[in-house]
Amino acid sequence: MFIVGLAFPLLRYKDMKQSGYINNLDNGFFARALFIGIILAVFCSLFIGTEHNDRTIRNKIIVGQKRETIYLSNMITCSVIAITMCIVFFVPYLSVGIPLLVFLLLM
């Protein structure tokens, strides 16, 4: 995600230099959020599916954990991963994209 966050503003900048059409930084900002959603769907399905497939959820219930706490822990884990993916994508995107946009507007 970090490399994708670095590559997208550079590719947009190259496209703006060739076409002469100035794109705003926010146009690509939220369009790439769809990419994060797809990767997150794959990660969560693999994470939770492996737990069900290996029957570790059965072991957790036998030990005495409630189903609500098991599902809540899965939800919290997937949410933390989603927030981390967003940060790992958007920080490089903005740190590369803002200087390029300012440089392009000053020219």
Image (tube, helix red, strand yellow):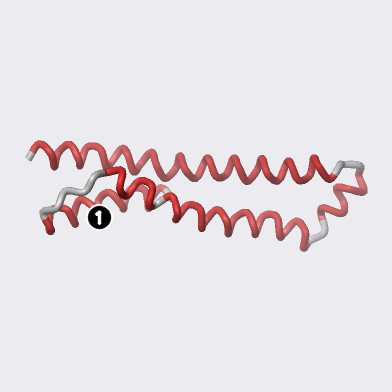
Q: Is residue 47 above or below residue 70?
A: below
Which residue ends up furthest to the bottom in the rendered image?
Answer: 53
Q: Residue at x 73, y 41 (%)?
A: 73
Percent coordinates x, y for residue 63 in the rendering = 91, 44
Rendering coords of residue 106 (x, y %): 10, 36
Looking at the image, residue 1 sits to the left or right of residue 64; the answer is left
Q: Quadrant for residue 46, please give it.
A: bottom right
Quarter of the view holding residue 81: top right
- Which amino acid does the dot numbered 1 rest on? Leu
For the point 25% across and 51% down, which residue is it?
10
| Above or below, 82 relative to 20 | above
Classify the position of the C terminus by image quarter. top left
Label 1, residues with CA under 10 Å away: few <14, some 14-19, many ≥20: few
Residue 104 placement, left or right of 60: left
| Residue at screen point 76% across, 45% down | 71
Residue name at image x 47 percent, y 43 percent: 86
Whole-percent x and y of residue 28?
A: 32, 49
Q: Secondary structure at mark 1?
A: helix
Q: Report x, y in % for residue 48.
A: 70, 55
Q: How many marks?
A: 1
For mark 1, what is the residue?
Answer: 11
